[in-house]
Image: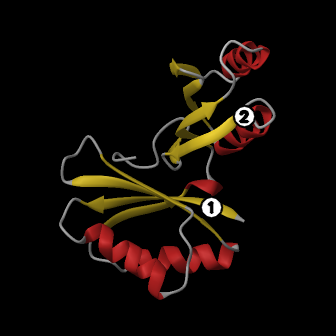
Amino acid sequence: MRHIISVLLQNEAGALSRVTNLFSTRGFNIESLNVAPTADETVSRLTVVSTGSDAVIDQISKHLDKLVDVVKIVDMTGTDHIERELVLFKLRLPKGGPEEERLASVVEAFGGRVLDDSGGHFTVELTSGGPEIDRFLEEVADLAEMETLTRSGAMAVTKGAPISPTN
C-alpha cells in the first residue's frame, strides 16, 4: 500500500542524509521525496512516499523516530489530508493541427496551464493529486509525444485543525 509520511526535521547539515540512509540500509524504497522549510526556520518538512504494508510503514516510522534530527512523524495515509504534486510536461505535436486544439481542451479540463508553445513543443504545468496526473498522462498519450516529464513529488497537509502547532 502507498503511504505518505510527513516528517518534521531539524534544519541541520546531514539530517536529510541520515533519513535517506535509514531507508537505504533497511531496504525500503522511496517513491518520492520532497523537502522544504516551514514557518519555523529551524524545522523543515520532509514528505516521503513509500510503499509497504502497515507493519512495514510502522517499522519505518519507529526507525525514523529514533533519529535525533526528527521532531515529529505523521503517516498522512491514516489521516484526512490533501495531497498535491506539481508536474511540468514538455509535449511535442504537429503545429496547428487538430491535436493542438484537443491538447488545449484537455489541459483546461485538468486545470493545467500551457506555459510555452514554441514550434510544436508545448510546456504544460499541472498541479493535482498523483492519480489525476496519471489520468492526464493517459489522456494526452494519443495526442502528443512526451519529451520531458518532471514531477515534484507529493506534498500533503492534514485537513481541518492541525495535528500539532507545527503541522
Q: Is residue 50 above or below residue 130?
A: below
Please tell me how crowded label 2 is: few (under 14), some (14-19), or many (20+) other residues with Cα within 10 Å.
some
The residue located at (69%, 23%) in the rendering is 94
- Give 22 or 90, whichever is nearer the viewer: 90
Q: How is the image coloured?
A: secondary structure
Q: Residue at x 74, y 15 (%)?
A: 97
Neighbours of disc 1 within 10 Å: few (<14), some (14-19), many (20+):
some
Q: Nearer the viewer, mark 2 or mark 1?
A: 2
**Does 77 appear above or below 118?**
below
The picture places residue 109, in percent across and down from the top left corner, at: 72, 18
Instruction: Locate residue 90 relative to residue 45 in the image: left or right.
Output: right
Taking the view exactly as shown, the residue that stands out farthest to the bottom is 25
Residue 79, x across and y down, in percent:
61, 50
> Image quadrant of residue 136?
top right
The mark that comes first in sequence, 2 or 1, is 1
Residue, disc 2: 136
Task: In the rendered structure, find residue 3 and report the number of the disc placed on it.
Answer: 1
What amino acid is at disc 1? His
Q: Quadrant of the N terminus?
A: bottom right
Q: Position of residue 49 (x, y in %)?
A: 56, 60
Three-letter residue code for mark 2: Phe
- So how many labels did they put on this image? 2
Q: CA distance from mark 2 to mark 1?
A: 22 Å
Is residue 65 visible in the rendered image? The answer is no
**Kind of element beneath mark 2:** helix
Q: Quadrant of residue 29?
A: bottom right
